Amino acid sequence: MPVLELKDVKKYYKMPGGGQYEALRGVSAKFDAGEMVAIVGESGSGKSTLMNTIGGLDSDFEGAILYEGKNLRDFSQKEMVNYHKKSIGFIFQNFNLIPHLDLIDNVSIAMTLSNAEVKVRRQRAMELLEQVGLKEHMYKKPDQLSGGQKQRVAIARALANDPDVIIADEPTGALDAETTDVILNMIRDIAASGKLVLMVTHSDKVASHCSRVLRIDRGQIVSDQEQKPLDHHPQARTEVKIQQMSWFKAVALAFKNMKAKMSRNVLVATGMGIGIMSVILMLSLGKGVTSYVSGQMTTYSNPLVAEIQKTSSQKMRQQGMQAQQTGNSAALAKQQQKNMASLSGTSSASAFSKKDLKKLQKIAHVKKLQKGYSAISLGSNQLKLGKKTASMIYLKTVNDGIAKSEIKKGRLPKAGKNEVMIDSGSADNLSKKILGKKVKASLQIGTKTVTKTVKVVGVYEASGSGQVSTLLLPYSDLAKIFKDNGLTLKPNVVYLTATDKQYTSSIKQAAKDKGFAGSMQEQMTEMFDSILNVLTYVLTAIAAVSLLVSAIMILVVLNISVVERTQEIGVMKALGARRKDIRRIFSSEAFLLGLASGIIGVALTWLLSLGINHVTQSAFKATVVSLTPQYALTGLVISIVISMIAGILPANHASKLDPVEALRKE
Ligand code: ADP
Ligand code: MG
């Protein structure tokens, strides 16, 4: 049985203006193993078309091509891939070596596509390179070789999987006379070893060295001449295992491809990395600032005590907004007054009634209810010692919420003795030795400013990193001051002590369910959290736009890469790469680009966070960027996903390239 048999093969090309051109007009021939057939004919006579159809690169033909008796047309996709990998070896006029791979990798690329192990691959590639006399050049890149040397590499590559048929399309067309002889002898040796060689040539001299000459004119065989047969010296066949290329090998190959365009890829990855950085930085900044702010807003730390307020500031704001929306200016003015009043502690809306207190007292597990009062003033409450003044922002009553550990010096003030406790910051401002000193307090009570001499018996420091200046005095003392000035003190804070600390949060919840609110600090923290969350999302959205830009950048770069490597893709397909393999290689490049971008992004964020935190640490003793492993991982994943999505189009485009077209590209 002949190795190859052509039966009335016809090939039509569609013309751009409609109609078709018949490039092959019924070619029939039989070829046997060990033949060296010269295909001769004028330019445009259909030689390359015939070779591509025989080689399985172009399946759009009429008639039949039988390989070992089996019609190419009946081949399954897998059989076709195996035909490329194992049955046919291509040698091209312009060598078509892959420029960024060294000679070993160029020779072994077909084996890589067949998933051969690195060791096996290298071993075989070295043997073949030795056979073509290029062993000492094996680590060179193709552009470091002469034309003849390049063609020798291409011959070694064609032999890698030990095929039955070698198709050489003008292998000596680009070589001088001397190198032509060398290459010709090599190709003759291949045929002599028992393979079928089909070699296109222009030169009659080259043809005279072949065992058979086939002349083609305008798509038809015009003569078929047997010449002197070759001296055969059959060689042992190499056992080649053909498998499908694994993902891992695709990634490894992609990595080599990317190394070739290192500086471009580094630039792109850095650009994308900056996009990733902006996203992670925003997230980390949001988290860092939130935890800083909630750290600043610590309440008293006695775990048994729940601080309850009558109305939440949120509710008040909502009422204010309603007034604003309805355009009722009188209601708005009233609401604003109320807001001010509630802040300064004089609002009736924020005062607890007797009924309220009863309701709270009834909450399960409440052991004790303590009335309290808390007001904020901006500048009107002051303490004076000698010439020094401290402005007290908070005026508060002594309460069970204060843990013992928070009293830094002295003790809690006792009722009826004009004793007070102040925060450590204000204490330091007034005097280093404040304990036991009498200070002059000016307090805003209703509309009046009341002056009173009080004794500082305690200094406290709330847990948390910062605190607001606070003056604490017993509730009954404050009530007396109010009474002396013709006013009645109503509690605007209630401290509920739980029977056990496990109930504290359920008490808080029960109070909220009854329409009361948590402590001012809790409310402010919640409010701040929600504002920061919104801000974080807005900033992250802006950062996301930069990611979109990066994605487009990656898409463009990968597309350029596909165009640049069209020829390479053609070669890979001729060597038996499936569409899937090509898609995988380009997807792997997108993956690697995404991975690199992600790593760069995380590294940049980390460096920036070190810098920013150093500055804020020395300025406000605060860490504002909190880069958690989750955020770093999020950044990496986002980067890889975006990059791979951007890679889908170019990878698909590459996988769909027509090998014949691709190989024709110069
Ligand atoms: P040869 O290799 O003998 O020089 P080819 O096989 O390359 O010739 O081309 C044979 C004929 O088919 C030529 O006339 C050429 O113009 C035409 N041809 C080749 N490829 C195409 C194509 N893709 N579309 C249209 N015509 C083509
Ligand atoms: Mg040609």
Image (cartoon, rainbow, N blue to C red):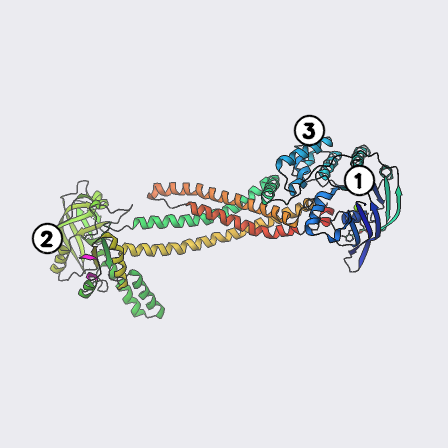
Which one is nearer the viewer's eye here, 618 or 195?
195
In terms of sequence position, does the residue under pointer 1 or pointer 2 come before the other? 1
Residue 270 in percent (x, y) is at 53, 44
Within the image, what quadrant is residue 607 found in?
top left
Residue at the spot 32% in from the left edge and 69% down from the top edge: 329
The answer to whether residue 366 is magenta is yes
Number of residues whose C-alpha sits closer than 10 Å to that of mark 2, classed few (under 14), some (14–19) or many (20 or more): few
Residue 557 image point, x, y percent = 60, 47
Residue that mark 1 sits on = 173
Secondary structure state at the residue bearing disc 3: helix
**Can residue 550 be seen here?**
no
Task: Give the answer, above or below, for where 143 lies relative to 447.
Answer: above
Asked whether the beta carbons under mark 1 and mark 2 sit within 8 Å of each other, the answer is no
| Residues shaded magenta | 360-370
Residue depicted at 49% across the width and 44% down the height: 601
Mark 2 beta carbon near ligand 1 (under 8 Å): no
Residue tagged by mark 3? 136
**120 relative to 306, above or below:** above
Task: Say whether residue 95 is visible.
Answer: yes
> In the rendered image of this protein, does residue 4 appear above or below residue 503?
above
Screen quadrant of the N terminus: top right
The amino acid type found where label 1 is placed reads Gly
Q: Which of marks 1 and 2 is in front?
A: 1
Label annotation for residue 416: 2
Regarding mark 2 in the picture, which secondary structure is present there? loop
- Cα distance in 3D space between marks 3 and 1: 26 Å
Q: Tag on residue 375?
A: none
Q: Is residue 216 left or right of residue 551?
A: right
Residue extending farthest to the left is 416
Neighbour class for label 3 at 10 Å: few (<14), some, many (≥20)? few
Q: Marks 2 and 3: which is nearer the front?
A: 3
Disc 1 and disc 2: Cα gap in Å? 114 Å
